[in-house]
Amino acid sequence: MKWNHAIKDYQHYLRIERGLSENSIVNYSLDIKRLLNFLEKNEITITPLSIEKEILQQFVFETAKLVNARSQSRIISGLKSFFNYLVFEDYRETNPMELIDSPKIGRKLPDTLSVEEIDQIIAQIDLSTPEGERNRAIVETLYACGLRVSELIELKLSDLFFDEGYINVIGKGGKQRFVPIGESTQKYITIYTDEIRNHLDIKNGHEDTLFLNRRGKQLTRAMIFTIVKRLVEKAGIHKQVSPHTFRHSFATHLLENGADLRAIQLMLGHESITTTEIYMHVDRSHLKEVIHNFHPRR
């Protein structure tokens, strides 16, 4: 079996069997291509079925010189997944990555923004321009609904159920969830759709897409990152802020104000509650208040 054949089969498995998004599939594939570049550079001719632990250890050692521990850990995890697939499909008997350990890394807590900082960022938006009205609706939606960037740019007009107070979100692996949306965010989206979007020359295939660029096409992930980066710089906030930071802030603020962790899990679209529990490490100050208010031995 050649590497290209193995990678295509693996991508098909990730897409069909595991239901991963195209972004996730690309990232998994990049881990294998890193290994292929290493083999080519060192003139090592070997197939995915015959490669053994020693060569992979050498690759991991060389990679450690180029990337940080977190990236190294992700690459090792990606290769383990690839070789597990080959074992699962009976192409190999063993996984050569099995005994290769990932570097020890601490859990990185997500940056969050305070409510005041979010207001400060939104205040930088120039509402005298059509893009300004759109950008306000984008930032408000990111924070009010805790969306991933991919979920935001894929949002459709037909996903808006304002009468019921919900939006329909298509998350990772095509999983569907309904997320509550507040009246103020509904108002900003309505202003954008009625006063800005209605006047765009919308291109074929984008008629139902909610957020569009000035050419009437769907916004890209990179454009959302650029919008947020420019607003944060203008606001003078010195934190590592990305669109995902609004999602973290959404969950953190709900938790700090007494929301149930299970409810937050459902709104974020996390498959496991252990993923949601990372937000418990951000601020534990509210836990004393929970005990004081609710425990019978308070």
Image: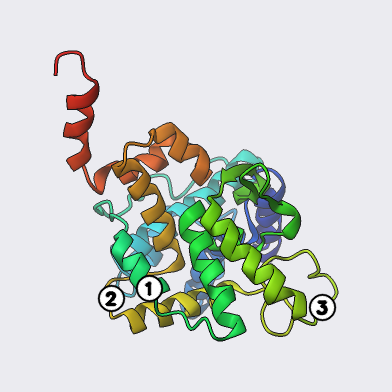
SS class of the residue under badge 1?
helix
Q: Position of residue 199 (x, y in %)?
A: 76, 80
Q: Position of residue 109 (x, y in %)?
A: 28, 54
Q: Nearer the viewer, residue 114 or 228?
A: 114
Which residue does the image show at 36% across and 55% down from the upper left? Answer: 249
Q: For mark 3, what is the residue?
A: 203
Q: Tag 1: residue type?
A: Ile
Q: Which mark is residue 296?
A: none
Determine whether, in the image, residue 78 is placed left or right of residue 152. left
Vertical placement of residue 217 versus 111, above or below:
below
Q: Position of residue 183 (x, y in %)?
A: 55, 52
Q: Tag 3: residue type?
A: Lys
Q: For mark 1, what is the residue?
A: 121
SS class of the residue under badge 2?
loop
Are discs 1 and 2 less than 8 Å apart at CB?
Answer: yes
Residue 44 in sight: no
Q: Which mark is residue 237?
A: 2
